[in-house]
Amino acid sequence: MPAAASIQQFVDDELRRCPELAERVHAGTLHALKDPERAALYPSERAHHFALLEALTGRAAAFREAFCDALRRRVAAEMRSAREAAAPARGGALELELVDESRVEVDIEISRAAQVIDSTAEWELRELQTFTSALAGLRHVSAHSLPLRPHTYAGALWDATGAVLANQAQRIVLLRAASAVLADELKRGFAQATARLEAQGVMPSAYRSVKLPPGSVPGRGARAGASALQSLLGEISPSRAAAGAPGGTVAGHTIAGGTAAAPVQAAQIAALVSRLFRAFAADDRVGADARDVIAALQDPVLRLVLADGSALHDLDHPVWQLLDRIARIGEDYAPGDARQRRLLAACTPLAAQLAAADVPTAAMVRRALAAIDAEADALWQERLAAAQPAIAQLARVEQREVLQHRLAERLAEQTASRSVPPAVRRFLAGPWARVIAQAMVEHGEAHARTQAFVRAVDDLLWSLDVPPEPASRQKLLALLPSLLGTLRSGMASIALPDAERDAVLDELLAVHTEALRGRAAGDTRAPGAADVVQRLRDELRADEPPPRPFGDSVIDVASMETVPAEFLPTGIDDGHVPADTFAVGQMRRMFVGGRWTRVQLLWRSERGQYLLLADDTDARTTHSMTRRALERLQAARLVQPLPPSSLVQRTIEKLTTQVSLQ
């Protein structure tokens, strides 16, 4: 059976057991919550204890269905990611995923739940991975061979909490309580899955074992690697080297300095290069396509090293950098990824050019490196161009926040000396400042819509302190329809929640009703002041929802989580920067969207408040992130530098170990 089919069959079998797992987790969590000490809730979480019990009781079916549906969806996404990466890039705009502090809190909690599972079921999980690696056709164990990973289960558990609770704080408490129960269940489940695979006759893959010779120090760097390369050259005996060297092909070459290489020394170099390339071909971390390109470089590398002895003394030599660069292309992308194919397609003619040269030089290799970098930069520029709509939108959002902050300060000063109800004062300095700022960014300061929103401030403040003359009351009566219409239009433009909108309008109803009570006592035909104001409010209710702003853009500001509508900016701090500042183009490993992924910084806003990150596992997905959200992830250690990777360095260390143990 093909490896992919074997893994799929195993996953399907495990997913069929999901309903029983979910029921046990639900029952175990409910039982734990009935005993507060066993639930191990923090004092701040105990206030939610009754709400959690009430939500879980009698909701086993909803919890089970949500957990299983989420697990199937997340596992399918894990298994589909490689296939989608291998497919040609689809047209259309980038998919933008917005990440703010609220979303980051969820990711942090999912990460913690995954850590609980990993630490509780560590041994069973590692043993299961030896069997799933064998199912995947791998010689050595790989954690990626198992789509049912701790963070996948943790993410499904978070989704299941949403089936019984709506409040995010309560869902987080429930996730913490249920994660320990899920971890215990998975500890047994992983062990049972391993036993089933073993009973089917599956032979587990082996872990890579690294035996270090006495006194050796791992991770010695490029200078130590070059020294090890010299040591390897010395360990190859002349007779063995001569026997393994291509006859008659190396004796005439010269070593750096211009002197002809002795036949034995040249044979030793040839044998060393041959051993290096055999080890390159056996490196599982490098994809098969990249290994083919590297194999084509064996002869030109040998001729270059014979002609340029400095390559044996410096692992920063361009020839080793070229091999590492090609290997990294094979490591960084899934097999068959369209970006990998494009980069390797650029490498293939470069390898042929080096092979065709009589004596390849370091300068020729540097030109090959520059050509690969140029192709990688072209990929970068294409992705940056595709992200321009999102970048422009985020730039407008930041501009709006700056304007909103300045307008809020001015409106606060304008109302400070007036008798304004507190609710109205907060409305003007908060949501209405956002209304004006958005109109300025969207339409410009001189636009009629923007000017109407600005004039509404003066009209509103006047309506709150109407002079007692009858003429003033008549003016107020004539002003209210347009004023209330403008206020409603502005509130709709920022999608102000109904509760906030009604609270402000109710406050104005009371004030305007009092102002209109000065009618002549004998005028019985006129309705009451409260009836007048209420009728005006009812007449102005929109018959259809207002058009959503920025409807044709990648981001809809009205629904953006990146800029929570309920919070007023407290200012723009230009001096503060994240602890681990990205440079544009740099890559990091980040836990976002409930999973670990590699991201690359595409763009940072002018004031540094917003970042646009490209998801390296999916050419069409980007993450818009606030600076504070990034700092929160960093504080939780969910942003990490990419681990160093050098094919040449690790191969030399491996060969050095083999020679020392012979």
Image: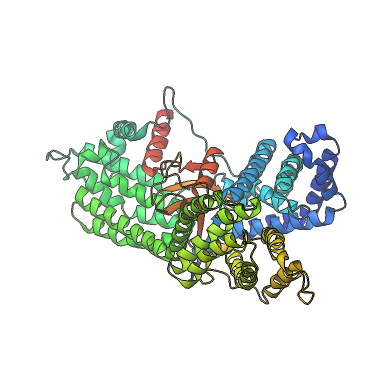
With respect to residue 214, does 658 lie above or below?
below
**Is residue 198 among what the camera can see?**
no
Residue at the spot x=78%, y=77% of the render? 525
Q: Is residue 197 left or right of residue 576?
A: right
Classify residue 635 by image quadrant.
top right
With respect to residue 485, does 71 lie above or below?
above
Residue at the spot x=20%, y=50% of the render? 363
Count of residue discs:
0
Quadrant containing the C terminus in the rendered view: top left
Residue 538 coordinates in the image, percent (x, y): 72, 72
Q: Camera-side residue: 431 or 278?
A: 431
Quadrant containing the N terminus in the rendered view: bottom right
Residue 244 coordinates in the image, percent (x, y): 31, 43
Q: Is residue 659 left or right of residue 169?
A: left
**Extreme residue in the top direction:** 215
Q: Is residue 116 left or right of residue 621?
A: right
Residue 593 coordinates in the image, percent (x, y): 59, 52
**Extreme residue in the left direction:** 258
Q: Camera-side residue: 653 or 70?
A: 70
**Is residue 367 among what the camera can see?**
yes
Q: Tell me which colouring the rendered structure shows.
A: rainbow
Q: Camera-side residue: 435 or 462?
A: 462
Residue 642 coordinates in the image, percent (x, y): 45, 43
With respect to residue 235, does 173 lie above or below?
below
